Amino acid sequence: ESSSASDSPPPGMRVSLASVSLAAGFGLGDVVCRPGNSSQGECQIDGTGCTGETVEFKPYTLAVSTWDRSTNSSVPLGEMTSYAIAGEIDTWQMYLHGPLIRPMERAANNILIPPMYVHGTWVNKIYKFENFTRGENGAMRATQKVVGHALAPSTGWPVTDPDTQKVKGMLVAEGQPFWIANEPGVPPMSLYKGGVTFLGGKEEDKCDQIFPGKDDPFHRMTGQVVNTVDCNRANGVCFFTVWKFYDDQAGLWTNHTTKQANDCLHYCLAEDLDTSPRCTKIGVVVDEHGEPVCHKEGVGAVHGMTIGKSDANDATVFDIFLVFTGKATFETGESSMRKVTVQVSKNLLGRHFKVIKSAPFATDLFVGMGQARGDVGGDHAWVDDTGKYVWISAFRLGGAGLHMVEYETGKLLFSVTGVDKYLKDNYSYAAGIHGTGTLGKKGSYLALATSACTTTKMCAPLPWEKPIPEQLWAKGVMFVLDLASMKNTTAQAVVV
């Protein structure tokens, strides 16, 4: 859930921008991204090279409900166990995004929480949690490490060894729509909006920005606010969602925004996804009707997206799920979702990307619940390991929490709520999900990162710095849901 208030540098800087651009770092690109520094107690991207610190995830019970289509209302069903850790002054504070669970790094027969990454957006840090063990009073203990730095990171896609699955680097979606990075040591500040950068696995590695591409010099100079990166390794294609939280917000989104800094879904025909990724072709995704998948009035733009299943008869064809979101508010707004079938083909002229078909998805959630309660605030999505279900996170009051729907039909099966109420006077809202396994299976978990504010009336990720009053300092919370822990506390049957 990236934030912004303008497509231009902050107002106080506009007049004098030309005179200070060189000193301020304008046009220099991402000057923040770098591997972890071992001399400062930081690790490399795979978690090696430092000790880390022991932290505790506290147990927290969430409510589970089903959806009654006939009445457009939720029906209480049961509860689910989660584990939570909140931001502090020396960690991610209020602004956390994009978890990434790594079940392949978990030891055989271990059913505890696998290692996972998460992105500290305000502090420009990437964290890794590993070595989960059971603690006292139902808590989980883990080792927390800083494994890299990036400009306002939102999500990441792991570059891995194809044989060992060891992480060798990370494609990081960066989105700093405030232009100014909260980063000491850059001269004297960074003026850049972000992009997609490859963060290498060695301390001496330099970051390599792959988006915006060199064939787009304007956006290469200014950057683009990227919320999500996801790739289909088998077909060598990645997707980048350029999205700003004020998309379609009157007074903030203007015709100038559409022309100079539009929010669109981009594809990248990629090479070397197992080593040092690069894009051989970058383009805006165009739907089956020839329309660019970009900002649209009354709809917003693609905020989150995830790769779905491949066609059983043609490996070049696969699904992607797009979550559209518009408006900058938390009590009202617009959001929707589409299932899109795409293809990456090859002929004598090279590789080609196209959309085959698309259709509305999860209408129980976005239309049914949205009409009953107000827009749910579509955030991100994850397809579970069975391929039968899709989990969708939502950040607005109307649907705050996590929702499980059928892959084929989009029918809403379960909602898990309560993440926004973990701390008093602290609205912790969904900002990315990822998981492993499936509902009801031991060793299955769903990670949810949240950012936070103290009130939904004017929700903004305010940093923990003066002159901002301490009573407005909110805590972003990292939740891990135990998908095997759901208990039915009513007489209804649970059918999955």
Image (cartoon, rainbow, N blue to C red):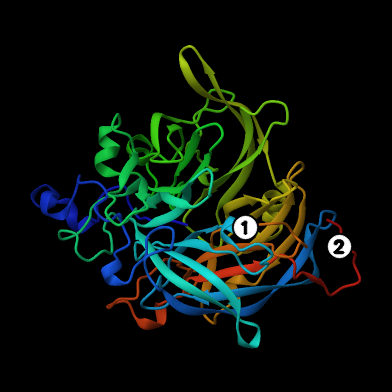
As helix, strand or loop, the secondary structure at mark 1 comes to strand
Q: Quadrant of residue 217?
A: top left
**Percent of width and height locating residue 20:** 10, 53
Quadrant that contains the C terminus: bottom right
As helix, strand or loop, the secondary structure at mark 2 comes to loop
| Residue 40 in the figure: left or right of residue 400 | left
Mark 2 vs mark 1, foreground winner is: 1
Rendered image: mark on residue 435: 1
Rendered image: mark on residue 466: none
Residue 251 visible (yes or no):
no
Q: Earlier in the sequence, mark 2 or mark 1?
A: 1
Q: Which residue occupies the extreme left position in the image?
A: 19
**Percent of width and height locating residue 9:** 24, 52
Q: Quadrant of residue 154?
A: bottom left
Q: CA distance from mark 2 to mark 1?
A: 21 Å
Query: Vertical placement of 77 versus 405: above or below?
Result: below
Q: Pick the residue in front: 120 or 8.
A: 120
Residue type, label 1:
Gly
Q: Disc 2 marks which residue? A: 494
Q: Residue at x 34, y 75 (%)?
A: 464
Residue type, label 2:
Val
Q: Residue at x 58, y 45 (%)?
A: 306
| Residue 151 in the figure: left or right of residue 164 | left
Q: Residue at x 32, y 43 (%)?
A: 209
Residue 188 visible (yes or no):
yes
| Residue 238 in the figure: left or right of residue 39 | right
